[in-house]
Image (cartoon, rainbow, N blue to C red):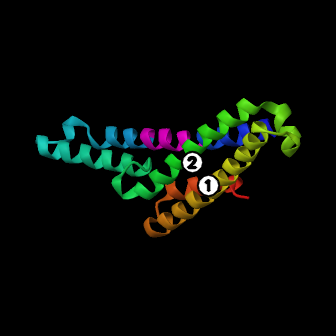
Amino acid sequence: YQRRVHGELQSLVTLLQSHVVHGLQHGYTGLERRCAVSDFDNLNALRDAHTSALEHMLDRCFLHPDHKPVMTVIDAILSLVLRLGVLVRTLGEHQLHKGMDVDGPQSNAVAEVLRQEALFRQYTAFLYKVLKELGAKSGRPHHQSLLQELRPFLR
């Protein structure tokens, strides 16, 4: 159980990190293409191109203010991942296999692990829903690729 939960948590965090890094790399490449100094005859045009590229990067990484709902859900998921990871490591494999046969504080901890895992599933499903709605509105392909990659986390 511990390895499965840890693997899922790690996979989701890695997926989100990869999405952000890819968004930054894609945006930086676009910035290099758009901002060749020799292509601009004045500083304002260069600044405008730079601002446009940065806006594009923020959008791809869900850091643009328009993506506050997505940022909020991702932040909640990452907080859950941290709490659940600490709980699972604290309890250890042995106690989790015993489940509710454990008395006292450990049974409370097992119940908390199960509650946090259920929240993790709910938040991940909600993130999927929010991204799907955002993708339908925006039609941006980078949002669609993240949707596809989130599907295995839905149960």
Residue visible at 25% across and 37% down in the picture: 36
Residue 110: say if magenta.
no
Residue visible at 20% across and 36% down in the picture: 38
Q: Secondary structure at mark 2?
A: helix
Residue visible at 12% across and 40% down in the picture: 43
Question: Looking at the picture, which amino acid does disc 1 mark?
Answer: Thr
> Label for residue 124?
1
* Viewer-nearest residue: 112 or 44: 112
Q: Which residue is mark 2?
A: 77
Residue 9: x, y in percent? 66, 41
* Viewer-nearest residue: 140 or 77: 77
Asked if marks 2 and 1 touch (Cβ < 8 Å), the reply is yes
Label 2 packing within 10 angstroms: few (<14), some (14-19), many (20+): many
Q: Quadrant of the C terminus?
A: bottom right
Q: Which residues are magenta?
A: 15-25
Residue 16: say if magenta.
yes
